[in-house]
Image: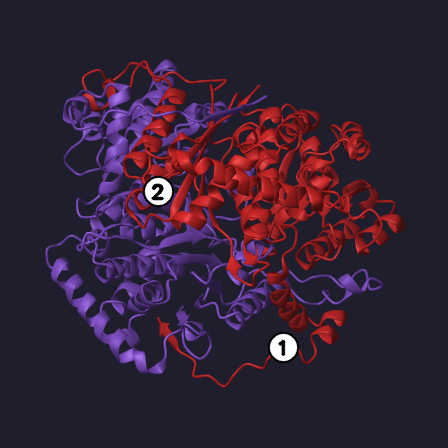
Chain colours: A red, B purple
Amino acid sequence: MAFTLDVTSMTEPVVGAGVPAAEWPTLAARFREAHAAVAGIAATGVYGYRELEAQADERARVTTFAAGVQGQYDDIVVLGIGGSSLGAMALRTALLPAAWNARTDAQRGGRARLHVLDNVDPRTIAGVLSIVTLPRTLFVVISKSGGTIETLAQYLVVRARLDGDGLEAARHLAFVTDPAKGALRVIAARDGIPVFAVPPNVGGRFSVLSPVGLLPAALCGIDVEGLCAGATVMRDATMGDDLEHNAAGLFATLQWRAHERAGQGLHVMMPYSDALRDLAPWFVQLWAESLGKINRDGTHVGPTPIASVGATDQHSQVQLFMEGPADKTVTFLRVDAAADDVEIPRLESGEPALAFLGGHTLGELLDVECRATASALARAGRPSMTMTVGASDAWHVGGLMMWFMQATTLAGALYRVDPLDQPGVELGKRLANKDLGHPNFLSEAKGTLPQDAAIPHRRLRVG
Amino acid sequence: MAFTLDVTSMTEPVVGAGVPAAEWPTLAARFREAHAAVAGIAATGVYGYRELEAQADERARVTTFAAGVQGQYDDIVVLGIGGSSLGAMALRTALLPAAWNARTDAQRGGRARLHVLDNVDPRTIAGVLSIVTLPRTLFVVISKSGGTIETLAQYLVVRARLDGDGLEAARHLAFVTDPAKGALRVIAARDGIPVFAVPPNVGGRFSVLSPVGLLPAALCGIDVEGLCAGATVMRDATMGDDLEHNAAGLFATLQWRAHERAGQGLHVMMPYSDALRDLAPWFVQLWAESLGKINRDGTHVGPTPIASVGATDQHSQVQLFMEGPADKTVTFLRVDAAADDVEIPRLESGEPALAFLGGHTLGELLDVECRATASALARAGRPSMTMTVGASDAWHVGGLMMWFMQATTLAGALYRVDPLDQPGVELGKRLANKDLGHPNFLSEAKGTLPQDAAIPHRRLRVG
């Protein structure tokens, strides 16, 4: 039960633009400054993702509810987008066996499948609705504000189906939303729909350890207390202001420093593990939406996170990482020992291209490739870090998620932005709401949207 | 049946760093130069991905084989990585109904599920092997060289299972590999395993329209002739040297120009369509591995492609695209009219946050959001293009893939690189092979690998 972060390949002399020994005191001081800024803001109570003890009651409601409905549903369908879906998807991939939704009821040991509808594409929604048995399905509607139009549109489609089939809303819907306000609260109260609270001080992309991620997980039998226990250990280990002993601070500071001093602002997240692969897109949202904005000096800042997966991407993006512009760092996530490793059989002894593989294991092969890629990158002068976890179980996955959230908060201070807001998506929302005739947004937007200029359109048609 | 590329938002005055009217002649001349370079190289016969007519016989073998085994298999399992897997995954998502592998045999109309094992993680392979019925499963082993260690390791695991169960290799394996050489050819000849050829002049990431992509597709009932028909139309429309009439040239030239002149080297691919979402990672490999390398002037060049999906990523990466550094272009892929749109029911009339949605359709919502995001980006000075296709059917998907492949070839000439090689991944391969005791690689590598320097390791342990 441990995490080990190795940052050797972010330093000189391993990589040319890495941290020279003499620079560590400066970085440590800069980190202490950022840490102090975060501590000041933390005192205002905005970092609710860390308050796992305060959320114990709501967590208990989640586990009690999940235990109470066990065996009632074959399918759990999450209606949610962004922060309301990426966490559940990462947990599903990490903590349920491979190809979960392709398994029969018996192959799943009677536990439910988990579908996450993270988009409003009619094909996907109609497709999923056509394969589930409604009387055996629970729809979990997740919107912190209760006003996310994609999720509400999905809810309306689902609600009409349930009503049409004469199925009781209170038995086939569960909501996760603000504790006091929003349309979902009103509907839940009216119809007796079970509802779970996202604490007001927990934003969407920081909400995976709230009912947003935990309710879908618990409904499929994932150990949510294990998740939170690992997260608590990681949180406690990443509260200090000493760079040398704070793994989240070290990650944040080295990424920021690579961007600031070496122009390495593209941050690749590369798990060498199928279980951990969906942590990458979850991290992408966290890092991109928290840090990509106009900072306190009025500058457009923010790293660009890139999701990747090993060994697969050795046959895709690694060519670019090795020989393209030197503008990237790579963070490897590796698992210390595969729990159920598979030996490669000694067959085809007459074929040299195959014979040497026999007797190795697949886990060994994956790990050899991870180390080889890290080594090749270093020899090409490209920086990387490696985070090793003891296992891909709930405890470690919770810890990894907390590590990233803590790092993001600290990186916000280093980049001089508020990691909790997302002002850049408002204009798009307003334009969409205007087109759809949303009553409030229409009037709010009045006069503030510039007219399309009379510009020459350039279009090319084929076929 | 048509494609429309709108590049208005790559131009001035829509976006500040866009193409001013006066620059078009320069760009057209630069494109003619690149086109001439490509034409010169094309004469040597290396661009086999275009030679769809020459591949008609092998394609007919694929469709005949697929028709002949129809009904024999419940599960098709592809063993392949990178260029041998991304195409099949993109085709599965685009051209089979949603949640395909979660469907029962009846829900799939008797057609087979399609699993793609694109990694050597033991958990995934063991998981998939535990849920398929071996006597009803066909394993398609894809390696152009016949020497891809990940794929060969998977093959050995699968082969031992088949042998152990007394199942005939010739009935449960099919190979896709080089027409004449490599270990898979030898094994196929020995055991009577059906084998299909990847033309020698078709590289992995350009191979989706060869048996590499077409065999898995055909086995699941996808219309491979439709794919190739759309691709042929697109190819013929993108052979000319007139920038104003070559959609692939326009895409390549505008992306290259944005990188070269405006520092916009991060190229986001953002389908607003769940069907087309896996075209993005397929494009990422194509663009990254083809263009990210040391160019003829000895410079590290290449754009960084980024996979995204709308409307989902409005709640993730779009904040960064809007307000982060102005280093990105966004390419939207949209579908003209959703074939099976879903109306949003008029319910919850008492809740303003929901009531206004009733009567719209989900397809309309998705499309409104696409246009709103493009518009918001333009208003923030961020460039984008929009490619609209008539439908997400085989014909258009084939056309889109050919569009991207043609654009990549042309972009190679603009970036002054060979888009067909991948020298940067050799070192990592050699290091891995050395660790695994590969006989040839061990001796080849002798003396050429620098020793690890005696460097101070920096590790931090938590837990």
- The quarter of the rendered structure image containing the N terminus of chain B is bottom left
Image mark for residue A449: 1
Q: How many marks?
A: 2
Closer to us: B131 or A285: A285
Closer to us: A111 or B46: B46
What kind of element bears circle 1? loop
Q: Disc 1 sits on a residue from what chain? A: A
- The quarter of the rendered structure image containing the C terminus of chain B is top right
Q: Position of residue A208 (x, y in %)?
A: 66, 39
Q: Is residue A90 visible?
A: yes
Image mark for residue A17: 2
The amino acid beneath tag 1 is: Leu
What crowding class fits label 2: few (fewer than 14 Cα within 10 Å), some (14-19), or many (20 or more)? some
* Image position of A23 (left or right of A165): left
B99 shown above or below B445 = below
Q: Position of residue A236 (x, y in %)?
A: 66, 28
Calculate the distance from the C-alpha at mark 1 to the C-alpha at mark 2. 45 Å
